[in-house]
Image (cartoon, grey):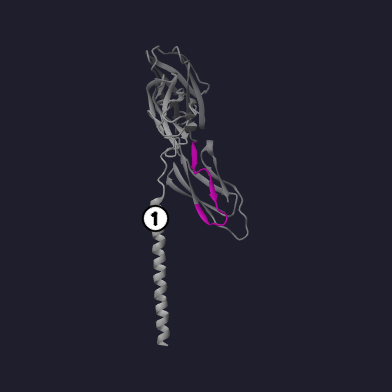
Amino acid sequence: MKQALRVVAAFARTRVVWIFALALAFAGGRSLAETNAAPPSTDGPQITFDATEHDFGSVDRTQALEHTFKVKNTGKRALELKDVKPACECTKVQSFDKKIEPGAEGSIRVRLDATNQRGPTKKFIMVISNDPKTPMANLALVAEVRADLLVLPSDSIFLDGLRPETETNHVIVIKSSMPAPIEVVKIETRAPWLKAEPVSSTTNSATIRFVTRPPLPLGTSRTVVHVHLDSGKHTVVSLAASIRVPESISVQPERLTFMKAVQRDMYTRVRRNDGKEFRITGLKANSDLLQCTVTTNQPGVDYTVKVSYAPQGDKKPADGKIEILTDEPTRSKVELPYTFR
């Protein structure tokens, strides 16, 4: 028995030695193969640019902005430009050399349309080639685009939280960088709740005042004001104007959403927005699955309505509205829609 065990042990040791030897041989062979592997080829094409970025400096939006990038093949085989792709529609590739022999130079002609640009501008162009090391390269066009006419503080006006009787004044200034003086010829606005009039005018600026005309409509109202200028170049400046006049009594949120299978309490605030007092006189829900209660936050001004939903057996809830009744004659009923999902 002991003799048999010694034979088995000797066999196991011999097997381990052979496995170890094979592993060394494999590793050595692989190392040798890696050592003898050929290095990456350097005989291919190589793309080189004289500059990858061009700065036009300070420019006018009407200027023709064109530039030619120089491309050289410093490799040993023909360089092929497969495609030249601008990243923006305002940039156009006018032409480029598709094949450049070793040691030769080609070009990429591009054009930047600055009509809709303003301020610091940087646009990229991707060059795709058969250069194995740099298959994609980026070029850039940079400019500081001057705006002929600039509206300050903004060319859009938004007046929020107004009351129907509110009369406000809002002033904007149109500034010009053109040599010719500007003069306001006329101002067009079709909204009956807004008046626009020139206040003053200098050689390179014009001040416009906007005045709201009560009674202002409830909700959000929008209009466009057209300012006609005699500036020798631009004739019309369009300004967007909007106002928001909350209802005398408002609810927030304006809609409640419940999950059909989930018991839940939801809340909405009911507020007076015109400085007058009101009271909630009743709550009506057209579903017996909803229970409504009201809490006073600030008497006559601010209330919270709690709406509780509890599923009941096989009853299927339906969408509807909660009526919030008040003692305000002009807003005696406020509707609060609710939905189930």
Say if the magenta span includes residue 277: no
Helix, strand or loop for disc 1: helix
* Residues rendered magenta in the picture: 247-265
| Residue at the bottom extreme, as displayed | 1
Q: Is residue 320 visible?
A: yes
Is 296 in front, or is 163?
163
Residue under the point 43% across and 24% down: 68
Say if the magenta span includes residue 253: yes
Is 276 in front, or is 251?
251
Q: Residue 69: percent from the left, percent from the top? A: 42, 26
Q: Is residue 297 above or below residue 232?
A: below
The amino acid type found where label 1 is placed reads Leu
The quadrant of the image that shows the N terminus is bottom left
Q: Residue 38: percent from the left, percent from the top? A: 41, 47
Q: Is residue 20 above or below residue 211?
A: below
Residue that mark 1 sits on: 32
Q: Residue 248: percent from the left, percent from the top? A: 49, 36
Residue under the point 40% across and 51% down: 36
